[in-house]
Amino acid sequence: MTKLDLSRFEKKMIIRNTRKEDINRIISLQNVCFPGMVPWKYDQLESHLDVFSEGQFVAEYDGEIIGSCSSLIINFDEYDDRHTWDDVTDEGYITNHNPDGYNLYGIEIMVHPDYRRMKIGQRLYEARKELVRHLNLKSIIIGGRIPNYHKYAEEMAPREYVSQVTLHKIYDPVLSFQLLNGFSLMRINPNYLPDDVQSIKYATLMEWNNVDYKPTSKRFYKTSYPVRICVVQYMMRQINSFEDFANQVEYFTDVASDAGADFAVFPEIFTTQLMSFLNEKSPSMAIRRLTEYTEPYIELFTDLAVRYNVNIIGGSHFVKEEDEKIYNIAYLFRRDGTIEKQYKLHITPNERKWWGISPGDQVKVFDTDCGKIAIQICYDIEFPELARIATDKGAKIIFTPFCTEDRQGYLRVRYCAQARAVENQIYTVISGTVGNLPQTENMDIQYAQSGIFAPSDFEFARDGIVGETNPNIEMVLIGDVDLEILRRQRQDGTVRQLKDRRQDIYSIQYKK
């Protein structure tokens, strides 16, 4: 008997997280599922993946996308009872996703009409439920359409229609399905989806409770989420060895640790202090010799971060990489011993002329135990697009190590950092070098006044300044920023720059 090849008959059903290459197929699917409604934009779905990839799922059957669903995490109690879909999704971009929230909010689920009655929707809901259990969230909340309501609108109010569906006297393809999947009705919201003609803009707010939810100390509602920052205004002075440099750095790390700081922040290229004992007159050659200290620098800061239990923004350092090019790189040394790096993207004419520095090409956002942060080195903070990209990726604090030789250069960094805080409703931090290195070419004079800046609104520090150092004096600045206030102000502030962006007429396209 010939052996039967069973693989010829297999058609695999897979529920998996959405990938970027799925986006165009999801948009096509939506046009089939919801004709007459405005479909997703490519950049909205791309934002879902950038902000909360875990919460996005597709159903793939024999290689074809036949279903999908999208979601984000929120603290539902903080939204108005009559919220709309635009309110809860930040107009479809989910940049208001709160990883410390309690509730998974489902914002869309769809199944291709040709594949209904195959329990595709149920499988997608099970994926959401499993995610909620995995993340230890309280519940799933959805704003569900009632697409058959238009057939009964002249006979009954939405409340009566929903009651009849609940009693199984009327069938509604969405509401009936949600009830069968264990969701209970919370209320009915008017004007939920303006283009939902079939539901006449109404939606049923429904909830599925996670019976496995276990409250933990960090999950209680926070009236504040303080993060303490220690900014080091670093004195550039003559030293005789790497050990001298290490002693100076350890002193400031100890100060930050004693203050209970979550972050210690050092300035841009402050490792050029090492050139004061290298005795190399040519700036380009001195920089190449400086790169030989890359490994000792990384070992030093990794040890300090772990030993003193503080996340360190290690200023920046010139690094020669395998392509033989030299880059200006800022490192994040986490207190758990892990390391990240951000290349400087915009190189000043001075860096190009004297040192031959090459630019990086990625805007990175880093996870820390105090939320998402970004690092934008000196000149980079003067390009508003970079801060907006980092904010859209979830950054709440942007750290800017800088090195400027005169007041004009310093003010460019400072004013732009304050502008970025206002524009993006984030905190910004600048840390600069002071002092002088008389025998070191192109690093002979320094000017700085370091600071921590906030958006300008009632709940933040007066003048949007959390704190600032005295100019041109070696010292530290210790200040607290509150991420909970930041989150609330993004929702309900006097102005809401992120929510009020006119993305219908402009956008920033990040090409990486």
Image: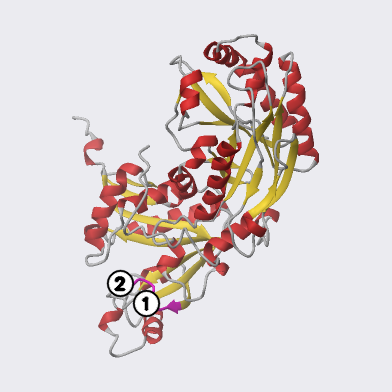
Describe residue 459's horizontal placement relative to residue 239 as left or right: left
Labels 2 and 1 touching (C-beta < 8 A): yes
What is the magenta range? 188-194
In what element is the residue under mark 1? loop
Q: Which mark is residue 299?
A: none
Which quadrant is the N terminus positioned in?
top left
- Seen in the picture, residue 344 relative to 44 is either above or below; the reply is above
> Residue 424 or 114: which is nearer the viewer?
424
Indicate yes or no whether the magenta region holds residue 418. Answer: no
The residue depicted at 68 percent of the width and 25 percent of the height is 436
Q: Amino acid at mark 2?
A: Asp
Which quadrant is the C terminus positioned in?
top left
Q: Position of residue 93 (x, y in %)?
A: 41, 56
Q: Position of residue 343 (x, y in %)?
A: 50, 30
Q: Position of residue 224 (x, y in %)?
A: 68, 59
Report the magenta stretch's main SS. loop
Quickly name the residue at label 1: 202
Describe residue 173's horizontal placement relative to residue 129 as left or right: left
The residue depicted at 37 percent of the width and 56 percent of the height is 69
Q: Amino acid at mark 1?
A: Tyr
Choose top left, top right, bottom left or bottom right for residue 438.
Answer: top right
Choose top left, top right, bottom left or bottom right for residue 165.
Answer: bottom left
Q: Which mark is residue 196?
A: 2
- Seen in the picture, residue 184 relative to 330 is either above or below; the reply is below
Indicate which disc, 2 or 1, sits on the residue closer to the N terminus.
Answer: 2
Q: Is residue 214 visible?
A: no
> Residue 341 or 347: which is nearer the viewer?
347
